[in-house]
Amino acid sequence: MNSRLASIIRKEFIQIMRDKRTLVIILIIPIMQLFLLGYSATTDIRNVPLAVLDQCRCPESRALLDAYRAADYFLLAYDVGSEDEIRILIEQGDARAGIIIPPDYNAALAEGHAQVAFILDGADASAGSTMLAAATLIGQEHATALMMEKLERSGMDVENFQPPLEVRTRVWYNPDLVSSHFMIPGVIGMILFAITSILTATAIVRERERGTIEQLIVTPIRPWELVVGKVLPYVILAFIDTLEVLAIGHWWFGVPVRGALWLILTCSGLLLLSGLGIGLFASTIANTQQEAMLTVWMTLLPSIFLSGFFFPLEAMPKVLQWISYIVPLRYYLVIIRALLIKGVGIPAIWQEMLALSLFGLLILGAAAARFRKRLD
Amino acid sequence: MSETVIAVENLTRRFGDFTAVDHVNFTVEAGEIVGYLGPNGCGKTTTIRMLLGLLEPSEGRAAVLGFDAFRQSEEVRARAGYMSQKFALYDDLTVLENLAFYGGVYGIRQGAPIEAALDLVGLSDHRAEMTRSLSAGWRQRLALAIALVHRPKLLFLDEPTSGVDPTARRAFWDLIYELAAQGVTVLVTTHYMDEAEYCGRVGIMRAGQLLAMDTPAKLKSTVIPGEVWEVHVEPLEAGLAGLQNAEGVLRVGLSGDHLRVIARPGLGAETLRRAAQVRGPSPARVERGEPTLEDVFLSLARI
């Protein structure tokens, strides 16, 4: 390696190692984010507190409640005496749902037209829709069971009875539909992108802030050597973070790593091109480290929202979907989710890889051209 | 006999409407110590930046070590040393690490040139110290060592002594002489008049224009239009006003606790004394003064 490049890399490493606080932040923050998002950003519904108004108190109503108890979606938390009590519990947030069984439930059931009411707190739309589906499904399953019993009593041969249509669902790749399997690959992308862009921008602007950039320019150092030498140590840190998050995601959260590790790292490298480019670009605009941080954040936040990290792109308005095509992180999330969970190979993701490379080189090239101008 | 190290022709730099450097011409020969004297913002730093190719001249050109300063700046930079007024040091590196870094950037891998630079500036015993804990004087020496680590033939020093105490400044100039004795050409900017006296030749700069450039002695004898007098009077303002209007007085300026007057030769001390105390009750004390670069500056500044 040439002596100029080696000197910068060595210097940068000394400075990183000496700044323990920043080093710890770089290595610890991803783990914190991973745990935070792995646990908090979940749409899985478990043990929703349910208020029960059972006005019948008969064996039939108890059988229905048992059906709700058996599926662990709901926790039969409150036994109440009136509808108002359900309202108050839901308003206070103590209960998220209520079930009302009418006094004549057993009689109506015998006649074949019983009804129960199910009340849901829809304030949280995504949790509400999951609860709605669960409540409906449990009710329908119980109704089917009751129907079979009735048919059996009427002398029909239930063993050989076949319903005319049966939908058999099979969920691939993530059979339990665990949210964290969707979130954690996203966290990897977000961390990789955020760390490289922020650190690149601040590392270069720091030289300008301290006035050392002027001294560097009058040395025989080339602009590319300066950029590469300064960011290479941070690229290495970003890869350490990637492996860190991948390992914890796999062994702690049970996220599968089905694709080849070399392919995962290669694609992560392609994302780094964009992160470096944006960081470098910000460094040509900003004069202080704060300005650099802000500039990067302004591109980072829309990137995260338009990448499909939290919300599926398919659910967004068409315009936002179009804009998302210029967000490099979007392609990476498609790639990393496919690699980790589906375990695909290059044939399935080559288009995204190509898009990621093109964007990376484009941004990096534009930033480098600007950087050169600022230097001279 | 001597070779021209810097040749500047009509060098001009404009920033929008503002002309920072205005058609400057001068040459510097090998082994000279040339001072560039002028107040802050008069275009000294802009001139040096153009000589190093950091800024493109709006007009004119500069040849440094035989290369075009802007188009062949890489050639110039490899052979010239530069010490900026900010002392471009890394606070979180030690003295040795700073020096080794810049050495490496110039392709110096072995320790000998780095040791030599440390020795020269007298920082050998402080090599392991963290740069942020150094005094201003030591920081200045380290910045000089960095500018010298690749043994340049030409050294640009931009306000090298700003913020440094007088003792350290004196020691710093001893170093500069040592370098010049080894054949290094030095171009140094300063706004300290006393420092400019140390230079072989001095250029006087004001508002972007190079008003004169010569040896301090020559400047004093040619530029100052009359005899130099020191006038001590209370209050100073009244004395200033009185002298400004007096017949035969060419220049009057404040200099610390007294007034400096340049008067037509032959104008007696008595005339000055009378002019100085038109209003003041206290008698003025008038003495002949040694001409200094300050008087040169004063003379040129009012043209």
Image (spheres, coloured by chain):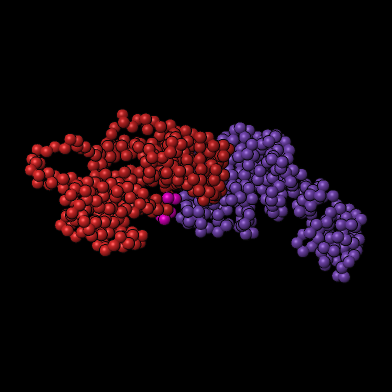
Chain colours: A red, B purple
Q: Residue at x 64, y 36 (%)?
A: B56
Is B61 placed left or right of B243 in the picture?
Answer: left
Is B174 placed left or right of B247 in the picture?
Answer: left
Q: Position of residue A60 (x, y in %)?
A: 16, 55
Q: Which residues are drawn in magenta?
A: A15-21
Q: Of B293 and A25, which appears nearest the observer?
A: A25
Q: Residue at x 86, y 60 (%)?
A: B241
Q: Position of residue B262 (x, y in %)?
A: 84, 54
Q: Of B187 and A182, which appears nearest the observer?
A: A182
Q: Of A201 and A14, which appears nearest the observer?
A: A201
Q: Name the magenta segment's main secondary structure.
A: helix
Location of the N terminus of chain B (image quadrant): top right
Answer above or below: position of A332 versus B158: above
Residue B151 in magenta?
A: no
Q: Residue at x 32, y 53 (%)?
A: A120
Q: Residue at x 85, y 63 (%)?
A: B239
Quarter of image, res A352: top left
Quarter of image, res A102: bottom left
Q: Position of residue A62 (x, y in %)?
A: 18, 57
Q: How many marks?
A: 0
- Residue B113 in sight: no
Q: Position of residue A23 (x, y in %)?
A: 40, 52
Q: Of A177 and B8, which appears nearest the observer?
A: A177
Is B171 placed left or right of A139 in the picture?
Answer: right
- Residue A350 in sight: yes
